Amino acid sequence: MTKERLYLYDTTLRDGQQTQGVQFSTDEKHAVARMLDDLGVDYIEGGWPGANPTDSEFFEDAPKTRARLTAFGMTKRAGRSAENDDVLAAVMNAGTQAVCIVGKTHDFHVEAALGITLEENIKNISASVAHIVVSGREALFDAEHFFDGLKSNPEYTLCAAKAAYDAGARWVVLCDTNGGALPHDVRAGVKALIEAGVPGSHIGIHTHNDTENAVANSLVAVAAGARQVQGTLNGLGERCGNANLTTLIPTLALKEPYASQFETGVTAEALTSLLRVSRRLDEILNRVPQKQAAYVGVSAFAHKAGLHASAIAKDPSTYEHIDPAQVGNARIVPMSNQAGQSNLRERLGAMGLEVAKGDPALARILDRVKEREAAGYSYDTAQASFEVLAREELGVMPDFFEVKRYRVTVERRRNKRNEMVSLSEAVVVVKVDGQKTLSVSESLGPDGSDQGPVHALSRALMKDLGRYAEHVADIRLTDFKVRITNGGTEAVTRVIIDSEDGQGRTWSTVGVSANIVDASFDALVDAIRWKLVRDGAQDGATL
Amino acid sequence: MTKERLYLYDTTLRDGQQTQGVQFSTDEKHAVARMLDDLGVDYIEGGWPGANPTDSEFFEDAPKTRARLTAFGMTKRAGRSAENDDVLAAVMNAGTQAVCIVGKTHDFHVEAALGITLEENIKNISASVAHIVVSGREALFDAEHFFDGLKSNPEYTLCAAKAAYDAGARWVVLCDTNGGALPHDVRAGVKALIEAGVPGSHIGIHTHNDTENAVANSLVAVAAGARQVQGTLNGLGERCGNANLTTLIPTLALKEPYASQFETGVTAEALTSLLRVSRRLDEILNRVPQKQAAYVGVSAFAHKAGLHASAIAKDPSTYEHIDPAQVGNARIVPMSNQAGQSNLRERLGAMGLEVAKGDPALARILDRVKEREAAGYSYDTAQASFEVLAREELGVMPDFFEVKRYRVTVERRRNKRNEMVSLSEAVVVVKVDGQKTLSVSESLGPDGSDQGPVHALSRALMKDLGRYAEHVADIRLTDFKVRITNGGTEAVTRVIIDSEDGQGRTWSTVGVSANIVDASFDALVDAIRWKLVRDGAQDGATL
């Protein structure tokens, strides 16, 4: 059976930029466009030329993409011709193959926001679309507030949308601008427009996540006949975000009836890069990846419940709706007090530690995890600390070094200019290969500002680790989380440290103590020990 | 028209606890249960008695709620009677009004995971449900993998689900265990079970968000006839989370056709507490609130696009699908400084600070909050620090005392018994009423154990505050949260301290610095200053 083509339209660079706190630089826009092109979307909406300097700059030096680069703008205003509208001219001047213009289809907005007659608005839509077509470009019409308009004045809304199609628009895109439409509204809207004479092969869908229905609304639109889906990577976008292409792409590719009926430009191989694409965008924007994101979240295939974890060990298909490798993700069976020996062996296997069924070390590891979790530790994120603990019980954790003692001082006082300034100083005494070394560091960063006691401590600790020095040189602390929790009956501090190295490996460790500095120190020591094991430092490996 | 009753079943305390990184203490479970009861859900699933110590402890001292407290467990195992199954007995012994048991309805799972015959499984379901009913409890049957089972062996799946109903289950809950079902699957599943003879008024829906369809799947189930909706606050839950009740509750209450057709136990007034409930849960779990969350996210009604913001100023209904006040949220329009000032006056009024319209201090407060939030502060929860800041700008913040300098030392070394022990010591120099005092404290608690540098510091600071001593004597630090955040381009530490006094007042303060001890100290100083103001210490009030 030949599959029908479904078109993917990405608006990460335009609507995605409306996310609070998101502002792409021109270089970042180029990087994202390349990534989208490699992934295989059909259209890349680059921004609104003329609306802001970054967007204009992006189009001036537009990337060469297989995907159709699209400029966004709005229909010409009343009282001037399409040729003489300077806002539309700026959009046309970007010289893209495709141009998408937003226009009103809701009578209330035409009258309240534009203050023109309903007829004038339709003339503006027709003239603007015709202008784009005459210029030899592909025209897309974004029907703003389409679903609200349909409830207020269905005849007018359909007439306005149809006018764009009749004027030559390749796509009429039904936009749920305020995000309030539910799936049954979207189904009815697509069907009504098809009945009004616009074929489904010319209808697109653009949804927002204000009721968490952006993905469902896109799917129902396709089921009703629409053949273009608009969205953003990681669901970026105004307010609650746009339809999440990172979720829609695998759903359309892997789930029935979509998988059998349609094909998109995203190949099965490109699909395995989905997690990488998602993370790369977060890196560009310095956003923390959503752990619970569908398909690509670090928790998306994490099985914490004991019942699930033991069944997964027998057959992963028991509790997984797809194979995580299809989207570049991996299964996680976290250690927690609900886990049993079978998922423990699975977890150890994934770390390269093969342990025979019934090995008494398994029970010892579980006991120690349970005892430590009762004391306030948490291993479901701190996988590296778990590995260190397991290696100790299995007798495959080298000693590397021993910390004999340390001292940190934090002092705040007035300086000569009568400003309050702080300085921390740490002394760490470590024994490596029988040799005792005393290291001292203060807390000043490269720019001379105070970075606090944990940094001073980490610097002193890593300052002189003898033959392990080269292995720790590229460790970078990327996050540091602290909370007060219960350790037995006492309140204790739990510190989780995220680390990264020069090879891009990331790992998390945990420390617990009533004393926050001690807790941080223990997490730091675990982080270093994990890195030394992974580098094979015990075998005298060098970098 | 009388509305039909729709039942809300919350599983935050059971399935929500399957979220990676989430582990409630017994006290936290009590706090969440009270919050859910105030909100108006019908069922609160408290956990699995017998499966872990926290859950058992929670039920031993169960909260008194208007909602039906429900214990979760599984159907009896083969080869023993329901009366003699110890796992089921532990669940029954929790003594709850309602009991929900999960059982298999997918033939593959019965044979592969349980290793029993299809007939035995149905007998186990019937006998377990009957046992609950005979004990005078309300029985709920959670039909695991219902939608997958329906694809594999529809006759068997329907028969297993119907067996629970026939045995007296009040609710047969259709569970999309691996989260892979799409809305059309859920619609078909609910309809099939109704056709098989289970009335919709006895059907519940339990979905997961693995394809971002958990909310849509719940809505479509209700449209198809189901009358109980299960979910969690903030969408917590295994892997990608459960159906988000924080989204479903307002959608069912405010959106058609649901709003006209159904009523739930959540009143319009309780609905306005939704944002507060969502934030409180994040606080309990020390999770960062999702900015883009539907309805309750800080961005949910933030209008960044210029076109939208200017239309909103004319009429908010142009770009908002609901009035944000209905869920306790508020509009954010970056350009609207006027709206900012009126909100601010309202907030100050609530603190007993009446400020005239147009007072120049209002603009100064807004500027300083903006500047400090850019530096990493957050005043959403730290209301006491906000009040201190506002009082300073309004000229109604007494000086009380001045901190001249401090020093803290943390030391870890081996004691005489060769154990690693830690000790912190803090020196604080404070000026009160022109008098300089030097106080020193160490970090040992009443039982001789080390409590860390922040405790040493807080003790030294409060040790000698002259005539204010009696006011600070009853301050207790109840929580301490730390997070790395961005202050401009630098990574900084944000500390939030929760305090409580002898009168049961609780308040939160914030401190920000690259140095965690400095940040903690600033939050401590704010906490003391707020307490002194509230005690009227500046007027010489005594307790």
Image: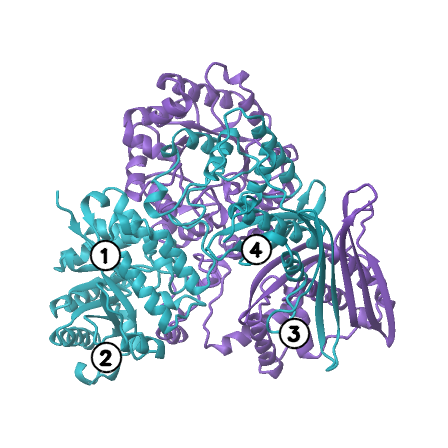
Chain colours: A cyan, B purple
Find residue B390 and name its label: 3
Residue under label 4: A472
Q: Which residue is mark 1?
A: A189
Categorize mark 3 by other alpha carbons within 10 Å: few (<14), some (14-19), many (20+): many
Q: Mark 3 — on which chain does it sit?
A: B
Relative placement, left or right, of A159 versus A363 is left
Secondary structure category for the residue under label 3: helix
Q: Secondary structure at mark 2?
A: helix
Q: CA distance from mark 1 to mark 3?
A: 50 Å
- Looking at the rendered image, the disc whose residue lies closer to the viewer, 4 or 2, is 4
User: Is residue B309 shown above or below A262?
Assistant: below
Quarter of the image for residue A277 reads: bottom left
Which of the 4 image quarters holds residue A69?
bottom left
Question: Going 63% across and 71% down the picture, which residue do you hit?
Answer: B349
> Counting other residues with Cα less than 10 Å from the Cα at mark 4, is it few (<14), some (14-19), or many (20 or more)?
many
Depth check: A73 or B124 in front?
A: A73
Marks 4 and 3 belong to one chain: no
Mark 2 chain: A
Give the label, 1 or 2, closer to the camera.
2
The residue labelled by disc 2 is A88
